[in-house]
Image (cartoon, helix red, strand yellow):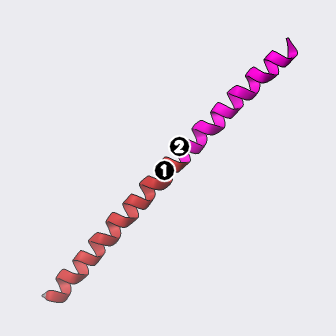
């Protein structure tokens, strides 16, 4: 019975760690997308300013 509890705790801890890692990766990805979009908008504004 002890071994089953230990295995269940271990599996549960592993699932939690995987979920946290996935959330962190998603956050980084969305920040990168926002920065990329911001960069494109700023680039367009600079080009518009230079052309006028």
> In screen coordinates, is 27 left or right of 11?
right
Tell me where residue 19 sits by quadrant: bottom left
Query: Who's the residue at 53% across and 49% down the image?
Result: 28
Counting the numbered discs, the total is 2
Q: Is residue 7 left or right of residue 32?
A: left
Name the residue nearer the viewer: 4 or 24.
24
Q: Describe the element under mark 2 as helix, strand or loop.
A: helix
Image coordinates of residue 25 in percent, x first then y, are 50, 55
Secondary element at tag 1: helix
Q: Specify the segment rendered in magenta.
A: 29-52
Which quadrant holds residue 34? top right
Q: How crowded is mark 2: few (under 14 residues within 10 Å), some or many (20 or more)?
A: few
Magenta segment's dominant SS is helix
Other-residue count near label 1 (Cα within 10 Å), few / some / many at <14 / 14–19 / ≥20:
few
Q: Give the spatial CA distance, label 2 vs label 1.
A: 6 Å
Q: In which quarter of the image is residue 45?
A: top right
| Residue at numbered disc 2 | 30
Q: Where is residue 18 in the image (x, y as percent from the top left)?
A: 40, 65
Image point (75%, 24%), residue name: 44
Q: In the rendered view, tell whether residue 1 sits above or below residue 42.
A: below
View extreme (top): residue: 52
**Which of the numbered marks, if any, corresponds to residue 26?**
1
**Mark 2 touches mark 1? (CB < 8 Å):** yes
Where the N terminus falls, by quadrant? bottom left
* Residue beneath the point at 15% across and 87% down: 2
């Amino acid at each position: 019975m002890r071994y089953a509890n230990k295995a269940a705790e271990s599996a549960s801890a592993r699932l939690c760690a995987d979920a946290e890692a996935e959330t962190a990766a998603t956050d980084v990805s969305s920040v990168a997308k926002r920065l990329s979009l911001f960069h494109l908008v700023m680039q367009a504004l600079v080009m518009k300013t230079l052309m006028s």
